Amino acid sequence: MLDYGRTVEVDGAELYADLHGDPADPAVLLIHGAGHCRLNWPDGFVDRLAAGGRYVVRYDARDAGASTTFPVGAPPYGLPDLVEDAAALIDALGLGAAHVLGMSQGAAVGQLLALGHPERVATLTLASGTPGGPGHEQPDLPPMADRLAAFFAQAGGGGGVDWSDRAAVIESMVEGERPFAAVSRPFDEDGVRRLAARVVDHARDIAAQSTNPYLIDAGRPWRDRLGAITAPTLVLHGEEDPLFPPEHGRALAAEIPGARFLALPGTGHEVFPEHTWDTVVPALLAHTANRGGPAGRA
């Protein structure tokens, strides 16, 4: 149920957002991960949230989808800029305080948003995250799975792709998602390929989207500040996450006061596969219910 799309100007970029549901309902802001765009949040998942009485906002971050892109290999921004973008988007859309849901790099943005702009975060949900953000050393937590380390060592994330060849780009994206998926369930190759085609056709610059978000500076580590988060927090984590094994999610929940941890069986480092929706959607609706934000929207 798409209401409309909107382009919002922030400092140094334009961000494209689409909005689903009734604007009078509590707003849920979805922050995608590195290399993804708003379309990576499944349409059916968004529709379920909207049907549950939530006003769902998906948006393309810098270098993603229909938002502003920058030269490949030279993004002139860092993770703190993505945090300020999220805050500016909440303001521009008149959301007051949003229920923030971030996945992977989006979970890092969510942590910093809750720390730096607590008045804009009614509740916080962190999926497939790690305490303190990607790119920071976490010696007390398990490293990525061997199969994923091998994938990165082989430069499987897009090196050598002819970005002008649509079919080759789509195939690269499919193979790029494969090692992140749970191994206990069949990989949904057809579904991932259909989504990849949509993502490629939606992107202003698919090379920038697939490259630049991995090059940005994460800034100073902030794990030691997580105890200052005041937003009610839900941590969701795949039991088979090969990038951030489940101990990362448990540690993240342990360091945020009052946070609840919910494990997702049969799930890797993935954006809520459909088999998780019967668990995730009710948990999100319960987590975001009856939480009053400063502007009274939530």
Image (cartoon, rainbow, N blue to C red):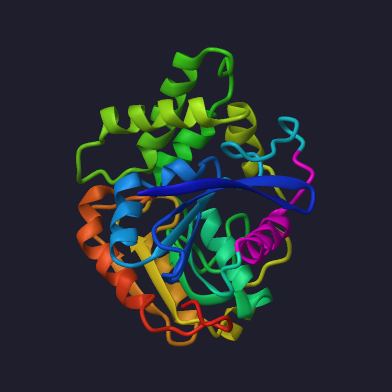
Location of residue 24 by image quarter: bottom left
Q: Who is closer to the viewer here, 199 or 253?
A: 199
User: Residue 144: horizontal and vertical position, in percent?
Assistant: 45, 51
User: Residue 235: horizontal and vertical position, in percent?
Assistant: 40, 70
The image shows residue 254, relative to residue 139, as above or below, that is: below
Residue under the point 25% across and 36% down = 187
Q: Who is closer to the viewer here, 272 or 150?
A: 272
User: Residue 234: horizontal and vertical position, in percent?
Assistant: 40, 74
Q: Who is closer to the viewer here, 175 or 16?
A: 16
What's drawn in magenta, residue-wise? 75-93
Quick check: 205 left or right of 266? right
Location of residue 60 by image quarter: top right
Residue under the point 34% across and 33% down = 192
Q: Who is closer to the viewer here, 85 or 173?
A: 85
Residue 218 inside the magenta-drawn segment: no
Residue 88 inside the magenta-drawn segment: yes
Quick check: 74 left or right of 25? right
Q: Is residue 138 visible?
A: no
Q: Is residue 227 visible?
A: yes
Residue under the point 52% across and 82% down = 296
User: Residue 201: horizontal and vertical position, in percent?
Assistant: 49, 25
Report the label total: 0
The image shows residue 245, relative to residue 71, as above or below, that is: below
Q: Magenta region, mostly helix, strand or loop?
A: helix
Location of residue 277 by image quarter: bottom left
The image shows residue 29, relative to residue 37, as above or below, that is: below
Residue under the point 42% across and 25% down = 197
Quick check: 194 left or right of 78? left
Quick check: 280 left or right of 173? left
